[in-house]
Image (cartoon, rainbow, N blue to C red):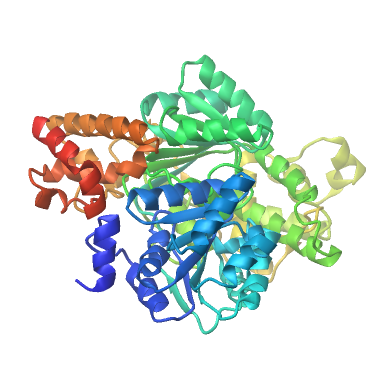
Amino acid sequence: MDEAGKVLKQYFGYDAFREGQKELVESLLAGQDTFGIMPTGAGKSICFQVPALMMRGITLVVSPLISLMKDQVEGLNQAGVHAAYLNSSLTPGQYRKALGYAKEGRYKIIYVAPERLVTEGFLDFALQADISMLAVDEAHCVSQWGQDFRPSYLKIVEFIQKLPSRPVLGAFTATATKEVRDDIMDILLLQNPKVVTTGFDRPNLYYAVQSPRDKYASMKNFLELHAGQSGIIYCLTRKYVEEVYERLRGDGFSATKYHAGLSDEERKENQEEFIYSRAEIMVATNAFGMGIDKSDVRFVVHYNMPKNMESYYQEAGRAGRDGEAAECILLYAGQDVVTNQFFIDNNKDNQELDEVSRRLVAERDRERLRKMTFYCFTNECLRDYTLRYFGEYGSNYCGNCCNCLSQFENVDVSEIAMGLIGCVESCRQRFGVNMIVDTVHGANTAKIRNYRMDGNPYYAKLAQVPAFRLRQVMNHLQLYGYLNVTSDEYAVVKLTEKSALVLKGEERIIMKLAKEQEHPAKIKGGREEKGKGARRGAAAGFSREEFTQREERLFEKLRALRTEIAREEKVPPYIVFSDKTLVHMCVVKPTTKEDMLTVSGVGEFKYEKYGERFLQCVQEG
């Protein structure tokens, strides 16, 4: 085993690096700027923590959120690594003390908020310190084209330019399209970086989109089927969070809440309730989650459709970080589009940008919203749709999403397509989607009469086609480039080069549609009860889904011991050991120290702290 492998085993308890990790570690150790794009749960932090422990000097990790820093530093300290964080959560006295220890060289790894970098106190330390590496976590925050742009990240380059010698730079993110990746490299001035992309697929996650008439009732049924499991429910607004939270509490669920309208103290308390597993369900806006490394989240439910695929991928990706099977359910309603459009039109986050840039960002946001909406309507593989969005291509069948587990048939919708495209052409491309659909459907509204669309040659031509089918076809035509919708606030439908092919009958439009004559697959909380994809995400070599009754009892005993230790140490349970580690213990059933050290996630330091207690529990189990 090489030196990096020994460090990985000693401090983190892993026998081998995951895909892409070793390449990134070796690049940083060689002194080369490095850029890692890895999905949530793929172990990005290992990629800079391992080289940080092997380098001569200090590693600074720039991180956007207090919760992320606290979580990572707790985990490092539990693994026997001296680490600290410097941010606004510390009192002036605590900050000075931590900075003093840093000057004495007590810490190998220091997490710091970006706005702290150029403050007088921190610069006084940094200019005298031996800084070997600077790692930028959540690097997409540096790009104004990213989904979570933070102007404070622009201070990173200013800080580096003030240093007497330039450290090696590492940048890491889970969510970045090609444009955002290029922007990150340009802004951070990465020098001939080693770029490693391990892919965006999370095979252990099951994806589903539902459009229930009663969202709450549907979600409540899902939660009842997942009793005792940890999960997150995302809502678009504070109002939705409060409503859902109150109803869940009234129905006896163990839930807490998180949004920007709560006081700092209440947010902190509620977050800890969830992190420490005292509350099973977190109901939150998108203000919650970045950097939360709770590994045993078994489901993420989106009560509303988020604003873009980047946000959805990141938020849904907080499920199943331990590699065990988890579910991501999106509950869609048309009002979600309206609410997101309102947020885009009234965005106050980009005030520092000039007017031209603000308009460009708004146009991109509208385009992203459309692609998010298409995700909710597509009958293609949901995983494949997500991968294509980020520039990867799969087989269009994953076996672990609601579409792949449903019954579909290919239907020729060319006549409907010709009617919709013909209407767009005949009205000289002046109207939006709703007007086109209402016209071909023969709606008798004031707007139709005012614009004299009741005299359009395509008026009521598709009156016999249900409105929902017209919208499905309209979405399909946009998704595959037969029609386009402008990105301005009026969103007008336009023809494309491919439109004429349909109107002339030179190209047929074939769609995958659910078989109406058959009953839909039985759903148990989200995934098909007998679906072959149910086990697709099992951790390599061992899975709780295959447990015997005896192993299941042992797992619960180990989990209870973990909770007991977590309370004693005042840390979240997953900081002690992850669910995946407990599952592997149940499979290995260790009887000696040597056996225990073969368990994934058990290193020398953690064995010395907890090993004997877990060995005893296994032997008694």
Q: Quadrant of residue 246?
A: top right
Residue 194 seen in this snapshot: yes
Q: Is residue 293 left or right of residue 440?
A: left
Q: Residue at x 44, y 72 (%)?
A: 57
Vertical side of 496 occupied by 273: above or below: above
**Location of residue 223 in the rendering, given as x and y in whole percent from the top left corner:** 43, 27
Give 466 or 168, whichever is nearer the viewer. Answer: 168
**Location of residue 533 in the rendering, given as x and y in whole percent from the top left corner:** 31, 47
**Location of residue 234 in the rendering, given as x and y in whole percent from the top left corner:** 56, 37
Q: Residue at x 12, y 46 (%)?
A: 588
Residue 502 seen in this snapshot: no
Give 571 or 433, whichever is nearer the viewer. Answer: 571
Q: Quadrant of residue 448?
A: top right
**Location of residue 421 in the rendering, given as x and y in whole percent from the top left corner:** 70, 58
Q: Locate the C terminus and report the quarter of the image it occupies.
A: top left
Residue found at the very far right of the displayed protein: 450
